[in-house]
Image (tube, rainbow, N blue to C red):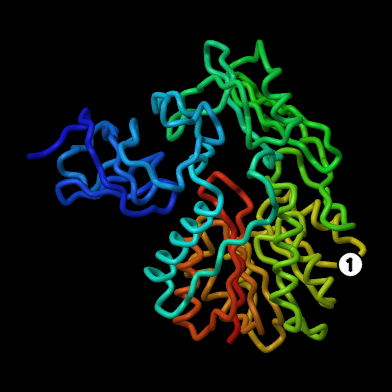
Amino acid sequence: MTSSPADVLELDITGIAHGGTFIARHEGRVVFVSDAIPGERVRARLIAPQEGADADTRSFWRAETIEVLEASEHRRPHIWAEADVSRDPADRPGGADLGHIDLDHQRELKRRVLTEALDRFAGKGLVAPEIEAVESGDGRGWRTRVTLHVDDAGVVGPYASRSHRVVPVTSYPLARPAIAAAALALQGEAPGRIELVEPADGTVRVIRREETERAPRVQRGFRKRPAPEVIQEMVNDRRFDVDSTGFWQVHPRAASVLDAAVYGILDGHVDEEKTHFDLYGGVGLFAATLADLGGTDIVTVESSARATQHAAANLAPLEIDAVTARVDRFLATRKGGGRAGAVVLDPPRAGAGRQVVEAIHGLAPDAIAYVACDPVALARDLGTFRTLGWNVDRLRGFDLFPHSHHFEVVALLTR
């Protein structure tokens, strides 16, 4: 007997998957289930496959919990009432996919995800660290950046989980209080996207991206948008300029925590006689860390020209070389030869990839600090490094995004 996408199944939840869903099995097929906890028994509604896909031939199904039959001892009232399992899954906002689980157990589940990724992709022998809490409290009020959407009817809100349908809400428990207030005050907006940003000065910026927005024409047919506002972020006593629409960590303490972690694992590995590299360097956070460790010859590489401009200004007193380039192309121009000291590698969610890892290996650096926001991508890259003869000497994990499945890991690699 097979099931159709309209079916509601009773499922025993056996594990957690990368990405914030949970694992069950039905008639030999894996089912990825939202809003559950390992050890629970739930009723879950299957999600119809995308057009053109046959539900009976797929190797896995996806489902949404609609009722908890046997609850885990770790289940709590959802941190975001509008995302609670009592609501129809189509009306639950996304962004807090672990919000129904007590915080200590969230961290244990994140560690399980990292353990499974390391075992599968990085080779045997690596032990996942505890996922460290970075603050006390209930995990609310940390998001300094929130993206909302406005539909054609003028409804403002987040997307429903795993959807592009806007759902109205009356609270934003993960947002900084000033952002939550600004979000709830929005009305009469044009269809499009709205970004709310709270930088170090505490004043919320509301950035509207209307669907009909068009950049003004300039000479020779090119289009150019106005330059975004430049805001300031602080790490300890150092100021960083960054575009209001540019990348910066969404937790107010994240940059400081990661800066301290990189400093700690690279302490003793930065030789002032060698060249050190900050790859995917953004506006220069970890280049500054390398300078604090005693580096005097430092190169930061970033593909965004705006970010590189800010890095050059942010790091001007340190005389750091800020290069605008794709990391893979930059590394293709470098040769080893014993001059490379430490490398900080902070790639996007997809990871660095084999080509970049092999190019870093070719630099023959003394040590590498890898800052990762995705456990599977990290594990794949660590596996590649290990096949090239590198040791993973230390791993630290940080729960910088409570009530979501996201977390950060910092690894030290030495030859």
At which x and y percent is residue 320?
A: 83, 67
**271 up-or-down from 44: above or below:** below
Q: Nearer the viewer, residue 229 or 267?
A: 267
Q: Nearer the viewer, residue 406 or 214?
A: 406
Residue 332 picture quarter: bottom right
Q: Return the residue at label 1.
A: 318
Crowding at dot 1, Cα within 10 Å, few <14 / some 14-19 / many 20+, comes out as some
Residue 224 picture quarter: top right
At which x and y percent is residue 354?
A: 47, 69
- Type of amino acid at the residue the image marks with label 1: Leu
Is residue 216 in view from this perspective?
Answer: no
- Residue visible at 75% across and 66% down in the picture: 260
- Identify the image quadrant of the N terminus: top left
**310 up-or-down from 140: above or below:** below
**101 up-or-down from 215: above or below:** below
Residue 190 picture quarter: top right
Is residue 307 in view from this perspective?
Answer: yes
266 on left or right of 313: left
At which x and y percent is residue 349?
A: 54, 54
Residue sticking out furthest to the right: 317
At which x and y percent is residue 72?
A: 39, 46
- Residue visible at 63% across and 44% down in the picture: 139
**242 up-or-down from 371: above or below:** above
- Identify the image quadrant of the C terminus: bottom right
- Residue visible at 22% across and 28% down in the picture: 6
84 on left or right of 343: left
- Residue visible at 39% across and 53% down in the picture: 16
What secondary structure is marked by label 1? helix
